[in-house]
Amino acid sequence: MNVEINDVTRRFGRAQAVAGVTLETGPGVFGLLGPNGAGKTTLLRMMATVIPPSTGRVRLLGRDPSGYGPRREIRRRLGYLPQNLGYYPGFTVAEFVEYFALLKEMPPGRVPQAVATAIERVDLGTRARAKLRTLSGGMLRRAGIAQAIVNDPELLLLDEPTAGLDPEQRVAFRALLRDLGGQATVIVSTHLVEDVGAACSEVALMDAGKIVFHGTPGELTARGEGSGAAGDAPLERGYSAVLAAARSATAAAS
Amino acid sequence: MTAVAAVSVRHRTPRAASAVPLNAARLLRVELRRNTMPWILPLIAALFWFDSYRPSTGTPPLYELRTYWNMGQGHTILDFGPFVAGVAAWMGSRDGRRGLADLVTTTVRPRWAAQLATWAATAIWAVAAYLVFVGVMFAVYAHQGVGGTPPWWWVAVGGMAVIAFSAAGFAIGAYWPSRFAAPVAAFGGFLAMFLSFQTGFSHTSGWALILPTNSSGTFDSSAQTDSGIFYPWLPDLPIARIMFLAGIAVTALGLTGLPARAGGPWLRRAAALVTLAGLALARLARRSPDRAADRPAHPQGPAMTTVGLHRPTPGSVPPPAAGTRRDRAAAGWRLARLYLVSRRVPMALVLLAGLGALLWAALHWRWNIAGGAAARQFIPLTIQTGAAAVIAVTTYGPFGEPERAAGRWLPWLRLGEAMALTAVAFGALAAGAAAGGMPGGSFALLRNFGGMAGIGLLSAVVLGGAFGWTGPMAYLLITEGALAHRSATPWVWPTRPPHDRGGAICACLVLAAGLVLITVRGPRESSREPDPAS
């Protein structure tokens, strides 16, 4: 298992963002769905070794990220695209991706080719020398994806990766996800259920800091059949049905 | 057609006349609640107590004597002005840093109006704090039974000076949305005030007289001759100074309305008129004290006592190479270069070179403050502190979490950058000191600047890189007070002789602590979205 999360919580002051999540996943594309404020980004940040859990145990790529040495090993094999990408507008696309390749301690001889390949994979080859300040929002997002995949990560964490991408790019990105999921564990946090349906082999649905569903997209679709839940697509109806059931169970318990 | 004709046309509901001021008030309320100024007020309060109130307690219980240092010599303005200018620059650069300019430009309300609301909130916080701090000080004096009348005219001058600093700083930030805008506004304002002291000693009328921190002309020297201590407060000079400061404030605010994005042509013409009116007001102020020239001349006012990537076509991409030593060195150099560029180090180098040149000019043309050997240190110290502030604000980067989650090199890059910039800054300042006459010589320069750089790095760790300049600025004000009152604890090392061991040890300890903490912890990062353009 590349990701083993056992009863993890995370608090920010009095607010509990993640409230006892247990999750295990291996290679493949894993979709993390949920409404705004469900705790998806916090869970992803813990997996990215940016913040530690308040309680519980996290193991990534067979290592405990709380120790300096194991964390360094994890970070060499990690790709991370946050929801809000920071960038220096004076960098070119190539410099931006190269900077992260070098920070991730890739072998120096491999860096130029890895950078070129990553930029090609997100279809920015013709804009490799363009300054980031000249790119559109969708292109910036693709540059962010390129920096995340430049080191061929074994664990790739993507927070809202398709936000701002045009339909053609989204279709291409789903294909890229499926390709990456062949060897690595790819965890995608998103609001867009069609991305999950098209690219993910496994899906978890979070609400109020907890995982309320864990299964395949097909199983999620089945939960919506005959439920009368709102939604334009079968997967959306499954999403709505699971959320409604979880919330009514919470209301009944309290 | 019939259906269209049958639909009644809905006219836009006319906006109530009261909606505009109400919306403006709401906008101001939002800006007041989300302003950076309140966060800096505790630091200003501490400095105000240390630099303005504390020195006055040793004087006899008369307002004229108690307020001689803090009001008559403008120290309350010194404690507020630089910080207000720096924070106002930070607020003024907000739209540019956060990429909000387009968003604000496309709203119905002109961008200039929105900017003025941001400035007004900043100025309201600053002026309110100034009045509260001075009011509390006077209340304490009253409780202590201090006799006489508070110098209300100088309170008005101080309040207007705070407004002028906020407007000038805001204009700098609006035109230059960079991480360096705040320290440049703060240290520029501070240096301008100190140079005005000297100007005030050389010239005791006209422009020099109306500079707010010039103590020449603050008191009626004929009365001083008669009574020795009972100085009447003169209303004409404060009025001229208020006009002068108001002129600066109006000019600065008018300048922010000149760019094409500020609003429509009429609004921009109005901004141009406001700018001209501000200049006229400032110029008019010069005449007022001249017209009151029947006042006895004061040739020597009360002394201010201190101082390529190519697209990979098949066959063109080199095959993966094993990491030879040369490859590793090249990759390390490349990483360091990209890291330094992302921290705006090239601009920092330009500023450091400029500070070296400024030090050379200050020493060559003897920009000294009257008041003896200690006072002569002050302008060089201000320039050194500015260099430390430049180093402090280069510590933070734009990338946020992906950078923190990528490998182990970041701490070493931070250490390397801090050490390299400290060395470069020392070199630039030493070159500037070659003009001769550097108080204390090279050893004092090394000690004073090294310690200041350490304070800047510590500030970046505690407050964040963007506010790293506030620590050196606060330390400079403490040093200024210590030099004036000849207190010489080793922790205020610039007050100690050049070869004093205690001062050198303290400066080294602070620099070492700054380097260790910036390496291990890095500058404090806020959880919000990183600034792409700063």
Image (cartoon, rainbow, N blue to C red):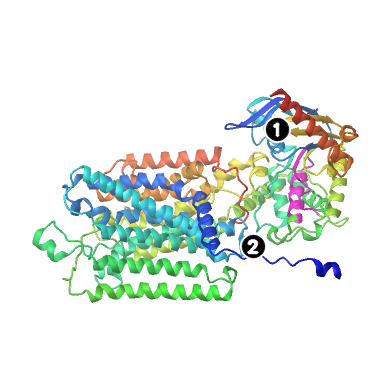
**Mark carried by residue B250:** none
Q: Find disc 2 in the rendering and name its residue.
A: B102
Query: Camera-side residue: A50 or B125?
Result: B125
- The residue depicted at 27 percent of the width and 69 percent of the height is B209
Mark whose residue sits in front, 2 or 1: 1
* Amino acid type, callout 2: Asp
Q: Label 1 near label 2: C-beta < 8 Å?
A: no
- The structure residue drawn at horizontal position 40% and vertical position 60%, both measured from the top left corner, is B163
Secondary structure type for disc 2: helix
Q: Quadrant of residue B501?
A: top left
Q: Residue furthest left?
A: B226
* Label 2: chain letter: B
Q: Residue at x 33, y 63 (%)?
A: B195
Compared to residue B301, the image places residue A233 above or below, namely above
B393 lies left or right of A137: left
Position above or below: B386 against B400: below
Q: CA distance from mark 2 to mark 1?
A: 35 Å
Residue A62 rendering spot, x and y as whole percentages:
76, 27
Give the residues drawn in magenta, as a range: A138-165
Question: Does B354 sit left or right of B343 as displayed?
Answer: left
Residue B402 visible to the viewer = yes
Q: Position of residue B124 (x, y in %)?
A: 43, 55
* Quadrant assignment for the N terminus of chain B: bottom right
Q: Which quarter of the rendered picture does the C terminus of chain B lie within? A: bottom right
Which residue lies under the disc numbered 1? A208
Where residue B208 sits: x, y (%)? 29, 69
Helix, strand or loop status at disc 1: loop
Name the residue: 40% across, 51% down.
B473
- How many numbered circles does the render carry? 2
Left or right of B7 in this view: B528: left
Instruction: Tell me which chain the residue with mark 1 is part of.
Output: A
Residue B249 placement: quadrant: bottom left
